[in-house]
Image (cartoon, grey):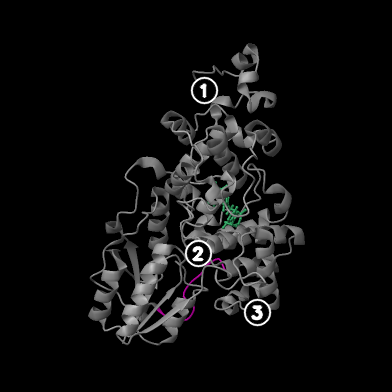
Amino acid sequence: MPTLLWLRTDLRTQNNPALNWAIAQNQPILAVYIAEDTERPRGGASNWWLHHSLQSLSQTIPLHFAAGKATEILPRLVQEYKIQNICWNRRYTASGIATDTHLKSHFKSQGLHIETFKANLLHEPWDIKTQSGTDFKVFTPFWRACLAQLTTGVTPGHGWAEASHYAGFGAPSLSPGLPSATKSTFINNPSSLALNHLNLLPKKNWSQNWPTLWHPGEAGAHHRLHDFLQTGLKGYAEGRNNPAQPHFSKLSPHLQWGEISPQQIWQATQASNAPENDKAKFLSEIGWREFSHHLLYHFPALASQNFKANFNAFPWATNPAHLRAWQRGLTGYPLVDAGMRELWQTGFIHNRVRMVVASFLIKHLQIDWRQGEAWFWDTLVDACPANNAASWQWVAGSGADAAPYFRIFNPIMQGQKFDPTGEYTRKWLPELAKLPQEYLFCPWQAPTLVLHAAGVTLGEIYPH
Ligand code: FAD
């Protein structure tokens, strides 16, 4: 009797508890990926990533592709293949949890065996509580509680034993593959849709050069981690705020699709010989990811409702022209425009610049944070229902443990401080490349002669 393995945001072969469990049943495995009809469709950039990630995984595991409602597709497959065992790794959006709960009780009532696992977080959101038993709303004590569990090994749960081989070798495996089963263990299902029929690739030419920038899939994730540990981790604590420096991992899209687990990142980081403060700072960012998921689980409307209800009456501006200028990187504020063009051209923005562009939309243009969240949702390759919503609310001030509402990132000073040579801004705004550093972040203050010498005419090649 075959085992059905339902893959979702866990597109990897290593350190994948559901896959390991399926293999341990010693039965043929039907590995399924469903492009689900969900309340909130994935954005274009996420779809691009997903297509390539599935393509990569299907070279190791024969995957059965389907599109539509999981609640209709899975029961059909169970019947067709006389499935007895079903397993998956858990997810944390409200709609995902609702679907999974429904399916679990449906299959259980039919006498099937269901196993579900923690695979994409260090801690399940319900496992971390304050001393009085409530949910955390502030990051620092939350992360302290997580660290206490991690260092005392109280409830690490699934995934640690296998991830721990990283600790021994100090460097991640660069050619991941199946742990022990051979390909013949998997059912090659003739009724599967072709990957192309999931229609994930954007119709526009938008993402044409992304294959030169990104390598979706498990091997790509491990190469990224390896490179980061070699060249980016040392100096991370200081350098992570400078978008022109290599001190950020770009692991976010790989984590979003579960091509690598946080346990693997944790172990590899601990085993590296980078300075302790750099390791701690980097792992605390993985902690922010945990915190966002904690918030999403306990406040499922995170992407659509203010976490703090006293923001509900905020009089947001409606200004399609301003929104469009922001989206296209044509606001006239160079650091903001550089970030928004990086986003459009690569599907990514550096974290410091994300904060600046988000603050600009919300606090300078006074446009509702949900409009920015939606644009990021569509255009980020790492668009994450937890991190994106929590971060936008953090900048707006409406979120848990958020920046105070009156804190406004100054787009000129942020540029001068965090892009001190102008390398990042000049890269994304080539029309301003020749401006002297003094005026790079405020070209409107430059004397006419200076603008002329740099080939800049405000209002023509760059907005006023
Ligand atoms: P690194 O500095 O290398 O950090 C390692 C990992 O830690 C990241 O890959 C990510 O998983 C996690 N992480 C880092 N910073 C944060 C953070 N502030 N909050 C939560 N997790 C974090 N991150 C997403 O993954 N998806 C999103 O959709 C997303 N939207 C954002 C929107 C806004 C307005 C802002 C300000 C931040 C957003 N972030 C989002 C958080 C952060 O900017 C990215 O995770 C980070 O820039 C990814 O780059 P990296 O992998 O090089 O990060």
Q: Is residue 350 visible?
A: no
Q: Position of residue 311 (x, y in %)?
A: 53, 45
What is the CA distance from the residue labelled 2 to the residue labelled 1? Answer: 42 Å
68 sits to left or right of 131: left
Give the answer, above or below, for where 89 lies relative to 431: below
SS state under label 3 = loop
In the picture of the structure, the residue carrying the numbered disc 3 is 154
Q: Position of residue 169 (x, y in %)?
A: 66, 72
Give the answer, above or below, for where 436 lies relative to 8: above
The residue nearer to you, when weighing 203 against 415, is 415
Sequence-first disc among 3 and 2: 3
What is the CA distance from the residue labelled 3 to the residue labelled 2? Answer: 22 Å
Q: Is residue 275 magenta?
A: no
In the picture of the structure, the residue carrying the numbered disc 2 is 297
Q: Who's the residue at 64% across and 48% down the image?
A: 246
Circle 3 or circle 2, nearest the eye: 2
Sequence-first disc among 2 and 1: 2
Q: Is residue 175 magenta?
A: yes
Question: Over which residues does the magenta segment extend?
Answer: 173-182
